[in-house]
C-alpha cells in the first residue's frame, strides 16, 4: 500500500512539474527574473526590500520575482495579521508570493485558508529548478 502511494505521489509531482514547465515559457527571457525559496516568514521583509532595490536597479529589465515559502513555517501563512504587511508590499512590487504545496500537506495546512493573494505550487523545490532552467536567478534562504 505504501509503495502504491509513493508511486502515485511521484507521478503527480512529475505531472505537476510538466505543467509548470509549460507555463514558464511565457516569461520574458530578455528581462531579469528572480526566484527565492525561504523557510522563514520574517525573512520576507528583507526579500521584499531586495526585490524593491532590484526593480530600481534593473529598471525596464526587471521581470518577475517569485518567492516560495517552504517548510514548517507554512503554518504561519494563515495568520493574516502577520502576513498582511508582506502581502501589501508584495502586491505593490508585483511579486508573486507562493506556498509550497508539499509543505502545506506535510504540516496539515489547509490551502483554502491562505490569503487570497498567495498562490500554491505543488513542490517548491521542483518549481525553483524549473524556473532556473528558464533563466531565473535563484537563491534559497
Image (cartoon, grey):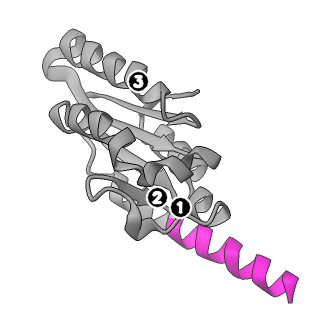
Q: Residue at x 29, y 16 (%)?
A: 54
Residue denoted by label 2: 121
Residue denoted by label 3: 47
Mark in the foreground, 2 or 3? 3
The 10 Å Cα crowd at callout 2, few under 14, some 14 to 19, many 20 or more, is some
* Magenta residues (range): 1-16
Q: Residue at x 22, y 24 (%)?
A: 62
Is 58 located above or below residue 78 in the figure? above
Is 77 located above or below residue 14 in the figure? above
Label whose residue precedes the other's in the sequence (1 or 3):
3
Q: Is residue 30 visible?
A: no
Rendering quarter of residue 6: bottom right
Is 39 located above or below residue 20 in the figure? above
Tell me if label 1 and label 3 are in contact, CB under 8 Å: no
Q: Nearer the viewer, residue 39 or 4?
A: 39
Numbered disc 1: secondary structure:
helix
Label whose residue precedes the other's in the sequence (1 or 2):
1
- Is 7 included in the stretch rendered in magenta? yes
In-image side of 44 versus 100 (left or right): left
Tell me if label 1 and label 2 are in contact, CB under 8 Å: yes
Rendering quarter of residue 114: bottom left
Where's the C terminus, which quadrant?
Answer: top right
Cα separation, mark 2 vs mark 3, equals 19 Å
Name the spot of residue 2 as percent of width and height, x first.
Answer: 86, 82
Cα separation, mark 1 vs mark 3, equals 21 Å
Residue denoted by label 1: 101
Amino acid at each position: 500500500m505504501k509503495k502504491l502511494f509513493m508511486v502515485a505521489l511521484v507521478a503527480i509531482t512529475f505531472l505537476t512539474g510538466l505543467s509548470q514547465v509549460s507555463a514558464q515559457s511565457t516569461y520574458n527571457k530578455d528581462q531579469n527574473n528572480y526566484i527565492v525559496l525561504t523557510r522563514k516568514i520574517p525573512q520576507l521583509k528583507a526579500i521584499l526590500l531586495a526585490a524593491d532595490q532590484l526593480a530600481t536597479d534593473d529598471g525596464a529589465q526587471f521581470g518577475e520575482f517569485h518567492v516560495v515559502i517552504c517548510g514548517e513555517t507554512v503554518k504561519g501563512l494563515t495568520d493574516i495579521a502577520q502576513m498582511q504587511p508582506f502581502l501589501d508590499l508584495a502586491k505593490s512590487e508585483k511579486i508573486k508570493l507562493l506556498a509550497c504545496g508539499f509543505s502545506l500537506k506535510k504540516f496539515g495546512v489547509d490551502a483554502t485558508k491562505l490569503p487570497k493573494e498567495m498562490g500554491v505550487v505543488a513542490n517548491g523545490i521542483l518549481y525553483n529548478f524549473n524556473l532556473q532552467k528558464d533563466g531565473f536567478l535563484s537563491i534559497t534562504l
